[in-house]
Amino acid sequence: MIGADGANSAVRKAMGVQYLSWNYDQMGVVATLHLSEATENTTAWQRFLPTGPIALLPLDATRSSLVWSTTHSHAKELLKLPEEQFVDALNDALWKQYPRRSLVDTCTSWVGGCLRRAGLADGAERQLPPCVRAVAPSSRAAFPLAFGHSTRYIAPGVALVGDAAHRVHPLAGQGVNLGFGDVKDLTDFLADAIYTGLDITHHTWLEKYESSRQRHNVPTQLAIDALYRLYSLDIAPLVLARSVGLQLTNALHPVKKMIMSHATS
């Protein structure tokens, strides 16, 4: 049996395994959006707001998927807004300019100068997010955000995948990637087991699956949780650290590729 029945997995509960979890006291507002104009739309956009991150994930040339992490009260307000007002609030969230800290701007400018003198990109290029024209009817919804991890992914004849095994904050857009990685490794190990003549419920390949995925998933989950906590604080030294950190990551392509490689595996 494959347990792919979500964060409240009945399969996981029937296994009787320990499930570590905590809530983020936030809601994720989701919707399907129609963009103002057709584009290549191959870039995922994310902006960190005082109430939480807002992200647009590309679907096709004219549509994107919204994940807006915010407070419970704000999420309820967004769901009640008429469509036009919701679109206005969304575009305002994507485009509004907030006051900037002069210390942070000074430091990132200095770091950019050092990078340019070293022959590197300054890591400070700016791109503009798309503008939203409308929201697809009946596509708005909201769900509570939380962290969760099953201490075991397997039991005799059973394997968990996706949110049934692990749950993360959507700020890094990695929940679906972790699930895809589970499915890929599960099918690979199952194929190897069948090729070598093992029974499909044999513990050897199931344990390899669990070990492989937990070695990948747990560090990723903890890193996402750390990012959430880092961006939840509005303390000047932390704002400076994360701003310079993102600038350096964007400028140092080997580091950027390493992070991308881990995120897509």
Image: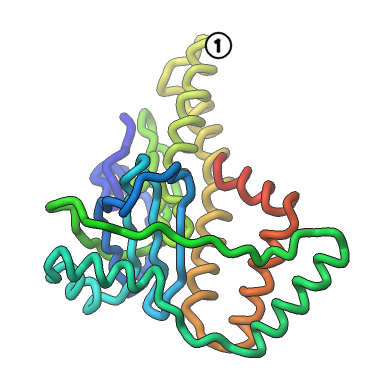
Asked if residue 10 is positioned above or below residue 1 in the image, the reply reads below
Q: Residue at x 61, y 47 (%)?
A: 260
- Does residue 155 appear to the left or right of 218 in the view shown? left
- The local crowd at label 1, few if under 14, some if 14 to 19, many if 20 or more residues have their Cα within 10 Å, is few
Would you say residue 52 is visible in this rendering?
yes
- Depth check: give the residue in front, 154 or 31: 31
Q: Quadrant of the C terminus?
A: top right
Q: Nearer the viewer, residue 124 or 65?
A: 124
Q: Amino acid at mark 1?
A: Thr
Residue 250: image location, x then y, percent: 67, 59
Determine if residue 20 is in view. no
Residue 240: image location, x then y, percent: 64, 81
Horizontally, residue 210 falls left or right of residue 19, namely right
Q: Is residue 235 above or below residue 214?
A: below
Q: Residue at x 23, y 45 (%)?
A: 10
Residue 55: image location, x then y, percent: 40, 60
Secondary structure category for the residue under label 1: loop
Residue at (31% x, 58% y) in the render: 132
Quarter of the image for the N terminus: give it: top left
The residue that label 1 is drawn on is 196
Q: Quadrant of residue 167?
A: bottom left
Image location (x, y in percent) of residue 122: 74, 65
Q: Specify how the rendered protein is coloured.
A: rainbow
Name the foreground residue: 116 vs 139.
116
User: Does 11 appear above or below 203?
Assistant: below
Determine the residue positioned at 83% across, 71% down.
114
In the shown orientation, is residue 89 left or right of residue 100? left
